[in-house]
Amino acid sequence: MLIKSAEFVVSNSDVAKCPKSSLPEYAFIGRSNVGKSSLINMLTGRRSLAKTSGKPGKTQLINHFLINKNWHLVDLPGYGYARVSKSSKKTFQKFITQYFSYREQLVSAFVLVDIRHKPQPIDLEFMNWLGENSIPFSIIFTKADKLKPKVIERHVDDYKKVMLEFWEEMPNYFVTSSSKSIGKDDVLAYIETLNDS
Ligand code: GTP
Ligand code: MG
């Protein structure tokens, strides 16, 4: 899919204030610093559409971006960032949970995980929660530029093994790198298929 336009629409912490349109949307979620905002920039080919940072905790709100005037990409705050205060952590958790529970326009979530790390309990728990709530999701492995292809293959296989302890099959997944534009066409083609279905 060709990205002809990508524009910021609105940021907020209240799912009730998200855009009212019925356009299909796709949300990126995962641990702080995993590369959610960078991935949005990579997919849209706009270097600073979503704000990124080397420090975790950069994205703090629900951010809607309108793509090709007919679908939304949603950048969300990360979970699992230890240095955020307890009260703001709770607020985050609340609006992230509400977003996923009530946002009818959400077609699918993308759960981002860093390809370098072993499966983390917080990610597995979050995916289980999505499953329990019948929210479709795919896994996006990020930062593939940091590992050699053979090691990527091994890490993906290890991830699959752990997933199969909880799931009947491995969810749909993508291997990506925002700095090297790896996986861009695959993720966009997948979104296009869902938009058309
Ligand atoms: P929060 O908004 O804090 O939850 O983080 P985020 O998940 O949006 O991460 P963000 O996109 O801000 O990226 C975090 C850091 O990882 C930045 O320093 C990025 O440059 C770096 N990064 C993101 N994607 C990649 C990638 O594919 N490869 C490499 N090498 N670095 C990446
Ligand atoms: Mg971010």
Image (tube, rainbow, N blue to C red):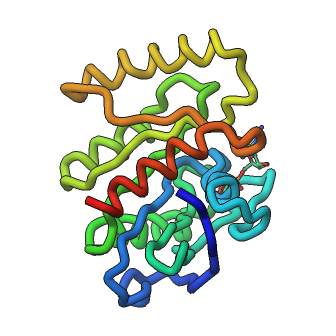
Q: Does residue 73 sit above or below 120 in this rendering?
A: below
Where is residue 74 shown, x and y percent of the image?
50, 68
Where is residue 106 shown, x and y percent of the image?
33, 67
Query: What residue is shown at x 56% (from left), y 56% (from top)?
Result: 78
Query: What residue is shown at x 19% (from left), y 53% (from top)?
Result: 134
Q: Does residue 114 sit above or below 110 in this rendering?
A: above
In the picture, residue 104 is in which quadrant?
bottom left
In the picture, residue 100 is in which quadrant?
bottom left
Where is residue 22 shown, x and y percent of the image?
32, 82
Q: Does residue 116 sit above or below 10 in this rendering?
A: above
Number of callouts in the render?
A: 0
Quadrant placement of the C terminus: bottom left
Query: What residue is shown at x 27% (from left), y 67% (from top)?
Result: 101
Relative to 84, 68 lies left or right: left
Q: Does residue 86 sit above or below 134 in this rendering?
A: below
Query: What residue is shown at x 44% (from left), y 39% (from top)?
Result: 139
The residue nearer to you, when weighing 145 against 130, is: 145
The residue nearer to you, when weighing 135 against 72, is: 72
Where is residue 15 shown, x and y percent of the image?
39, 81
Relative to 126, 169 lies left or right: left
Relative to 11, 96 lies left or right: left
